[in-house]
Image (tube, rainbow, N blue to C red):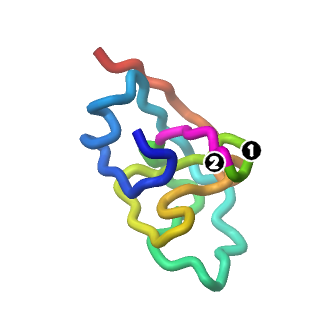
Amino acid sequence: MPEVANLSLSEATRTEPVLHYAYCIDASNRPANHIGDWPEEGKIYPVRLVPSKVEGLELVHVLGFEGNAPYFNAFSPHRFEIAAEVYLN
């Protein structure tokens, strides 16, 4: 699975053994150069947690979001709180 990609829920769950859901707790300070979807505070989203080789931390990828390079649909972990972890069969 690529580190950075715009993935749908079905694409992400084909290869990952676990699915996470996370609340957006901080939607502030959207960068002026960000092109694409942006989370809304208080909403819950299906996400994929991916260690970033560049950032050195685990980024939160919102499934179904579309965004441009270099981060596509990846957000800093301080913006989300994990609400559920579902193991897939």
Highlighted range, magenta: 48-53
Please tell me in which quadrant of the rendered image residue 26 appears: bottom right
Residue that badge 1 annotates = 56
Q: Residue at x 32, y 30 (%)?
A: 15
Instruction: Give residue 46's position: percent from left, percent from top.
Output: 42, 43
Q: Residues within 10 Å of mark 2 (few under 14, many from 20)?
A: many
For the residue marked with disc 1, what is the amino acid? Answer: Gly
Check the image and name the residue furthest to the bottom: 32
Q: Look at mark 2 in the image and give the residue it sits on.
A: 80
- What amino acid does circle 2 point to? Phe
Above or below for 48 versus 19 = below
Q: Regarding mark 1 in the picture, which secondary structure is present there?
A: loop
Could you classify mark 1 by the number of other residues whose Cα lies within 10 Å: few (under 14), some (14-19), or many (20 or more)? Answer: few
- Residue 12 sits inside the magenta stretch: no
Q: In front here: 58 or 78?
A: 58
Residue at x-position 59% and y-position 60%: 41
Residue 11 picture location, percent across and down: 27, 42
Position of the N terminus, as image quadrant, is top left
